[in-house]
Image (cartoon, rainbow, N blue to C red):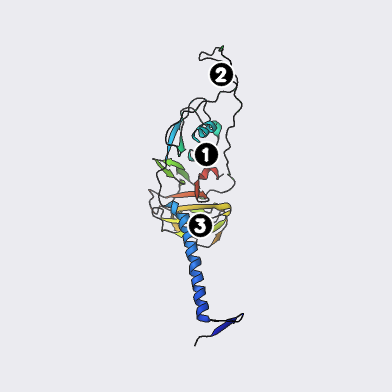
Amino acid sequence: MGSTIVTKGTAYSQGLLLRVKEITVHMHLAVCTIRLFFIILPLAGCSIYAGVYHTVESGQTLWRITKAYDADIQEVAELNDISDPTQIRTGQRIFIPGAWRQIKVEPYLPAGDDNKNGSGKTSTRQPTYHQEEPEGKIVLEKWRFVWPVKGTIISPFGIRNGKKHDGIDIAASEGSPVFAAQKGEVIYSDNGIRGYGNIVMLKHAEGFITVYAHNKENLVNIGERVEKGDVIATLGGTGNASGPHLHFEIRKDRNPRNPLFFLP
């Protein structure tokens, strides 16, 4: 006959308490599995990304272009690797996510520029003066992470052959050390995501997650705490990789961000 535990006047068998504890543990593991599923789900391959390319014309600014398309200037900047909005040039093609057709964008004419005709001579019509318009704020946080490997970028973040590439690919010698880009907790270390080979995922403060894929060998386990610069894997070519390289992603609240906006 099993023993009985009495708590506040209520009798519980040890078997029942053990069963309750077992159920609680399984529920906790199920919740953790569900959370991890929704974290890694977006990693399951590149997807076709809706949008159009806008060709920059004379006088158009990034702020004016994104305003005309009702697009987020930070998202457009990161997709097109534009860290300085003043450096866009005439003829440059800029991908606008979410747009379904090209829109005519009126050029910006500083005050005094619109009282001249095409020949450069002063026009007789009454000039229209334009207020100084904002350049548009683009946030760079190049202090936040460190480079995960020493090598050469062979594929950038953004649109690639009509599909969105959610990270950068860094080529280096097979077996090169892969470093944690910031301190955090290992939330995945396995090879169960199709195409990515051996992959490590770290959770960081403020909702950031970093992803390290195609590793030759993972050197950390789920639940481990790592410091910035710790070696967490060796570089390889596992999964769908044409050669040894690291596929590196930075995600904020599950959304992929351009790593070059966060690396020194």
Figure check: 2 above or below 157: below
Q: Residue at x 45, y 32 (%)?
A: 54
Q: Residue at x 47, y 60 (%)?
A: 34
Upstream in the sequence, badge 2 or badge 3?
2
Q: Secondary structure at mark 2?
A: helix
Q: Residue at x 56, y 60 (%)?
A: 225
Residue with the mark numbered 2: 114
- The residues tagged by marks 3 and 1 sit, at their Cα atoms, a distance apart of 35 Å
Residue 159 visible at all: yes
Q: Secondary structure at mark 1?
A: loop
Front residue of 169 and 255: 255
Residue with the mark numbered 1: 72
Q: Is residue 243 left or right of residue 204?
A: left
Q: Mark 2, residues whose alpha carbon is within 10 Å: few (<14), some, or many (≥20)?
A: some
- The residues tagged by marks 2 and 3 sit, at their Cα atoms, a distance apart of 59 Å
- For this orientation, the residue located farthest to the front is 9
Amino acid type at mark 2: Asp
